[in-house]
Image (cartoon, rainbow, N blue to C red):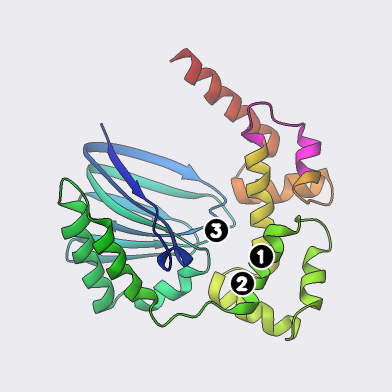
């Protein structure tokens, strides 16, 4: 049995952190494949084995177990858990990977690990308010870049259709090359890769609906040029074609009903 608790931070921490979660189990063995991660995750593992393998990942042994940092990915990645399970995780905004990588092996992160262990992991009733105040120290000197924020707003409000990137670049006060360099430094992906990641995630949302649309409709709605473009990008990010992925989803639903 797994004990799982989540907390949603308030402003100003929610500019960077979407969710803080804590999970415990006396014994857990799990090996699973994931895909199209659209967030950065910082994990403090206080017990036995916890591994994340794939693009943009960092691992470090620490005083209380280990730390793991996982960023955006354009291909499937694997998570392995074994033994006694005791972990605190932070789901962060996509641009936070490079920011946290700078402080990953520092006294600030050591202190955060200790505070989370003492205020969230050990107590019967976690103190997320204290944890949040310490978390803010990671971002106290961080200013969210206005061009990157503008880009996020653009691809969230405007549909991810053909030409949306060109329209955005034309509205910037800096050159396309400068923007791409700035974006890649923060996200570890190019803007076009990030748009594709958003498109794949939108397609996944449509597939998981109670009555999903046809795959041809899903591909076009998510902003892909045509069906072949949809299949190629989806397979790269998820490790299988949209049809195969949808078949797996149906099998999971059938098995869940039978259970």
| Dot label at residue 10 | none
The CA distance from mark 2 to mark 3 is 20 Å
Query: Label 2 belongs to which residue?
Result: 149
Question: Badges 2 and 3: C-beta atoms under 8 Å apart?
Answer: no
Q: Please tell me whether mark 2 sits on a helix, a strand or a loop.
A: helix
List x then y, in percent, for residue 20: 36, 54
Q: Secondary structure at mark 3?
A: loop
Q: Residue furthest top?
A: 258
Which tag is nearer the camera, tag 1 or tag 3?
Answer: 1
10 Å crowding of disc 1: few (<14), some (14-19), many (20+): few
Residues in magenta, as a range: 207-219
Real-space Cα distance between discs 1 and 2?
6 Å
- Of residue 234 and residue 111, the one placed in the foreground of this image is 111
Which of label 2 and label 3 is nearer to you? 2
What percent of the width, then of the height, locates residue 201?
Answer: 63, 48
For marks 2 and 3 on the same chain, the one whose residue lies earlier in the sequence: 3
Q: Is residue 151 above or below residue 249?
A: below
Secondary structure of the residue carrying tag 1 is: helix
Label of residue 73 in the image: 3
- Packing grade of label 2 (10 A; few <14, some 14-19, many >=20) is few
Residue placed at 31% from the left, 64% from the top? 132
Disc 1 marks which residue?
153
């Amino acid at each position: 049995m797994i004990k799982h608790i989540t907390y949603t931070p308030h402003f100003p921490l929610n500019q960077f952190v979407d969710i803080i979660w804590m999970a415990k189990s006396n014994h857990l063995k799990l090996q699973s494949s994931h895909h199209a991660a659209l967030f950065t995750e910082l994990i403090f593992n206080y017990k036995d084995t916890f591994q994340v393998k794939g693009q943009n990942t960092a691992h470090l042994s620490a005083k209380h177990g280990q730390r793991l940092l996982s960023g955006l990915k354009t291909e499937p990645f694997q998570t392995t858990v074994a033994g006694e399970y005791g972990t605190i995780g932070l789901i962060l905004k996509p641009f936070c990977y490079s920011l946290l990588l700078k402080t990953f092996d520092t006294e600030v992160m050591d202190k955060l690990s200790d505070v989370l262990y003492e205020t969230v992991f050990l107590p019967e009733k976690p103190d997320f308010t204290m944890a949040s105040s310490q978390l803010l120290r990671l971002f106290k000197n961080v200013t969210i870049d206005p061009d990157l924020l503008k880009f996020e707003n653009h691809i969230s409000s405007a549909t991810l259709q053909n030409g949306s990137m060109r329209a955005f670049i034309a509205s910037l006060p800096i050159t396309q090359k400068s923007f791409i360099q700035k974006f890649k430094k923060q996200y570890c992906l190019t803007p076009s890769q990030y748009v594709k990641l958003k498109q794949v995630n939108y397609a996944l949302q449509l597939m998981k609906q109670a009555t999903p649309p046809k795959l041809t409709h899903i591909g076009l709605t998510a902003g892909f040029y045509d069906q072949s473009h949809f299949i190629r990008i989806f397979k790269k990010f998820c490790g299988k074609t949209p049809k195969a992925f949808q078949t797996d989803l149906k099998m999971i639903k059938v098995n869940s009903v039978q259970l």
